[in-house]
Image (cartoon, coloured by chain):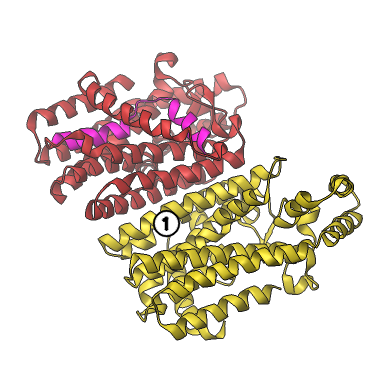
Chain colours: A yellow, B red
Amino acid sequence: MDNYQSLLDLFLNHLETYRKNLDSRSPKELYEPENYILSLGGKRLRPLLALIACDLFDKEPKLALNSALSVELFHNFSLIHDDILDAAPLRRNKETVHVKWNTNIAILSGDVMLIKAKQALEHYDFKEFKKLNTLFNKTAIEVCEGQQNDMNFESQDNIHVTNYIDMITNKTAVLLGCSLKMGAINANTKDEDQNNLYAFGKHLGIAFQLMDDLLDAFASDSKKFGKQIGGDIIANKKTFLFLKAQELANEKQQKALAKFMKTKDLIKKVEGILNIYNELDIKKLCQQEADLHTLQAIDYLNKVNANVSKKEALKKYAKELLHRQA
Amino acid sequence: MDNYQSLLDLFLNHLETYRKNLDSRSPKELYEPENYILSLGGKRLRPLLALIACDLFDKEPKLALNSALSVELFHNFSLIHDDILDAAPLRRNKETVHVKWNTNIAILSGDVMLIKAKQALEHYDFKEFKKLNTLFNKTAIEVCEGQQNDMNFESQDNIHVTNYIDMITNKTAVLLGCSLKMGAINANTKDEDQNNLYAFGKHLGIAFQLMDDLLDAFASDSKKFGKQIGGDIIANKKTFLFLKAQELANEKQQKALAKFMKTKDLIKKVEGILNIYNELDIKKLCQQEADLHTLQAIDYLNKVNANVSKKEALKKYAKELLHRQA
């Protein structure tokens, strides 16, 4: 991360200026929630990827600042609305927008944020603007489809690992690909390079999500992980781990899985399901799947015609991010 | 209206094709609500205005078909989300989306519809695309601000007629201006003509809303009006009528207004407030304000450099629409 501190600072400065402009806007019910969620911090991974991508081609990273702002606003819009859908009380240990204000304000301030995410792209010239917008629209729709499929999975029984990979690709991974591709568009690179960077980001995003699933069940330190360990198991979430276990389980294990899904004693439930995961070596299989997507990501990055040492730095950063989670 | 039947048919055909494409999209929870709300009908005033504007300059109206689709999708997105905010059970005598499905689906399918409204503009070339998008973004934000201010008015006491006019300008009128301006952009007219058409639509929109407020209190036939007469009075809505009455009322009338606002007997409440409106000649004042905006609208239309007989037809249509409501 330290290598990219100057890019991160560049973005944070830009975000600060944007947030200051929100102060003067009314009605405040629309703009205070936007300012609030942007103040909660986070890794700022998406905007950083946009700047990194532009810098990769030895172009001024500031060319990608408004793409970076656009993806960060979009991401935060999706958090506001997803927190309503999930009835989530907390986000980064602070109240969610629909709790701190109310659901109506969360819906409408989210809507405005989605529009402002697109408005950030108006700084770019005609051709660049259209290319960025077309990518943004396609990605935004995929993210919504991923979110809906994630909700649908809760009540569907015939979900397989491939459905799950498709869902997380839409819900999480395409926005990372989009962020990188936007930066490459701002650098005015060839389509081929833009598309290879997109694929790099997409597979990296899938690997991130798989590692997140893995840690949700197997992290040794909940503080470091930042979430309650076993949360997905308690919520009966159909993650890679669960679906893979269901796929490989023998009859006895199938019955045990079904039994533990209904178990009210949460400690017994987590223990019981983790035992089955261990019997079936699910942790290793999930790690292998994540490794597969990481390798695919690196393959795509290798194909990109960009500054070689900067590509190496990006590979190192990607691996650190994956490793840091583990 | 009959004069514009062929333009309306042109749009309805385009909408039909768009809706057919929705059938094959998944997850169906996102696309069935979109298809449903588009099936509920309505005047299709906004898309029609886009086509009329393009035709006004003797350009092929079909050039504006995707602008027309964009404003109609945006309008319907706003209906889905507004119906959640207003907890409205019915829209055009059918269940609202959040009732027929649920709030989560209404939020997310609305989000997708907002993105697809913008995607419809991708059919246009770079320069046209950017101009349309910039107008769309500005308008969409104003509509959300208008909606939030409308909600805020419920609990605010210091609202004046000018605040109300500002609110309905944003919530209702700018989208009519935007629809016309989009059609003018598609006709590749001068900026001056585009802006005059926008102002025509905006003032017409204000006049429409004022007539709607007037009819809500004074319509003689609720069936013809399509809504319950006195609905705004029952809901203590701060309409032009109410705010004007509050402004002009003497001390006795002020007290009576405040009393009737709290009256539980709804028949007495409506009667009591209508009496005060009559004492203060509020109907006439509202009609005068609507006439003022209609005249301003016509002034702007007169300035537009377009086919003279088509401008006359548009004036006639606008007056018919205003008259039909009364």
Where's residue A148, x and y in %?
59, 45
Residue displayed at 73% across by 70% down:
A225
Query: Of the residues shown, which amino acid type is indicated by label 1?
Result: Phe
Where's residue A304, x and y in %?
42, 73
Inspect the magenta stretch and tell me whether residue B303 lies in it.
no
**Which structural element holds mark 1?**
helix
Q: In the rendered view, does B317 fall on the left or right side of B283? A: left
Can residue B153 be seen at all in this image of the molecule? Answer: no
Query: Camera-side residue: A4 or A278?
Result: A278
- Residue on which the image places disc 1: A136
Q: Is residue B249 above or below residue A256?
A: above
Chain letter for the residue marked with disc 1 in the picture: A
Give the residues drawn in magenta, as a range: B31-56
Inspect the magenta stretch and tell me whether residue B33 lies in it.
yes
Where's residue A86, x and y in %?
67, 50
Residue displayed at 55% across by 60% down:
A173
